[in-house]
Amino acid sequence: MTTHNAVRPLLFDSHAHLVADDQVRYPRNPMQRAADAPYRHPGVIGKPGGQHGPHPVNEVPDALRMLQWMKDENVDGMVAVQKRMVYRLDNSYILDSSDQYPEQFSAVVILDAEADATPGLVRQYIQKNGLAGVRFFGGRKLDGSMPWLNSPEALRTWDVAQEFGLVIDLEVLSEGGGGPSIPAIIALARKYPAIRIVLDHLLEPEMTEGLSEHYGLDERYETLAGEKNIFFKFTSINLDICREENIPADKVLRRAVDLYGADHVMWGSDIGTSSGTYKEMVQRFLDSAVLLNPTEKAAVFHDTGKRVFVKGGVHA
């Protein structure tokens, strides 16, 4: 196998989904999207992997396969984000993988934010497993509320995350992007200063051709700038949308770094959901970073993600 680690810069992957080859020990329980679910751009459904791009390839990122890909591409660590579309709330595979390879994988579990058992499960995972964080996501109701984010039940888990200094990883799955969720996110960031809040896919701004001024990162997103404990992932989903909407990805990343700082922006492959080989995902990201200077590249490529998810994480 050809290796690229002699020429690749050092990378840290902040968003990757592990899916086991072993379906006996780790049975799959795939979800079906509801008929009234918000529109999702092509390539983000995953079984695992999407169906996107001119030549879609959806490889199964089993942990052992992932370790080899990481070695090939000079990736010294990655965040193993639970694959809800395949395993729902059974986090066994990413926890087992991070326990077996703690130097390579940092686990981010997905749990029901409003379930009574969730705070206790988070404590259990902290005590028994290496745990970097908890991921919550959902959509807005017609009245604009997001009970999965900040209801009294959900805040019980935020309290535990504050106690242990965990990451809370958020994705807002709503038509029109995550902009309307920003006031609630800022309020949570200020209420829980010990939590590092990480927003997936730049909080999915509406990027359409012609938005050359801000590339969807409009005045609402500008209010997130300066919040010390809010961070942003730039992933293959953002790159896919740029490709579909004919938007220059390098200028989107430049805009994000100008707005939030390289110390608050990190790369994530989204392998296991987005289509393409891992090698292709790395190369597409590197190509998008041509407008960054060397110091910014070092942060976005590696240092920001590792600082947020590993150095601040809770490990048994």
Image: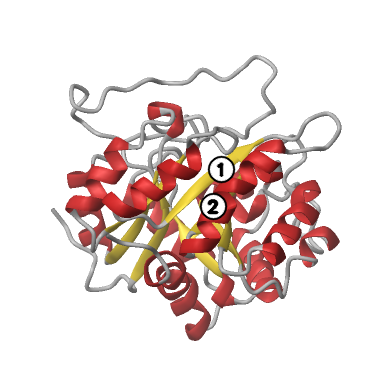
Image height of 234 relative to 259, above or below = above
Q: Position of residue 146 (x, y in %)?
A: 73, 38
Residue at 75% from the left image edge and 47% from the top image edge: 206
Amino acid type indicated by mark 2: Asp
Residue at 56% from the left image edge and 69% from the top image edge: 194
Question: For the residue carrying disc 1, how many other residues have a C-alpha within 10 Å: few (<14), some (14-19), or many (20+)?
Answer: some
**Residue hosting label 2:** 169
Residue most extreme to the left: 1
Amino acid type indicated by mark 1: Phe
**Which of the numbered marks, if any, corresponds to residue 128?**
none
Q: Position of residue 247 (x, y in %)?
A: 68, 53
Secondary structure type for disc 2: strand
Query: From mark 2 to mark 1, how far is it between C-alphas?
Result: 6 Å
Residue at 41% from the left image edge and 21% from the top image edge: 30
In the rendered image, which quarter is residue 19 located in?
top left
Residue 68 shows up from this direction? no
Residue 294 shows up from this direction? yes
Pointers 2 and 1 in contact (C-beta within 8 Å)? yes
Q: Is residue 289 left or right of residue 109?
A: right
Q: Is residue 187 left or right of residue 158?
A: right
Is 235 or 303 nearer to us in this picture? 303
**Residue hosting label 1:** 136
Image height of 39 relative to 69, above or below = above
Q: Position of residue 107 (x, y in %)?
A: 35, 51
Of label 2 and label 1, which has the lower sequence position?
1
In the rendered image, which quarter is residue 171 located in?
top right
Question: For the residue carrying disc 2, how many other residues have a C-alpha within 10 Å: few (<14), some (14-19), or many (20+)?
Answer: many
In the rendered image, the quadrant that contains the C terminus is: bottom left
Count of residue discs = 2
Secondary structure type for disc 1: strand
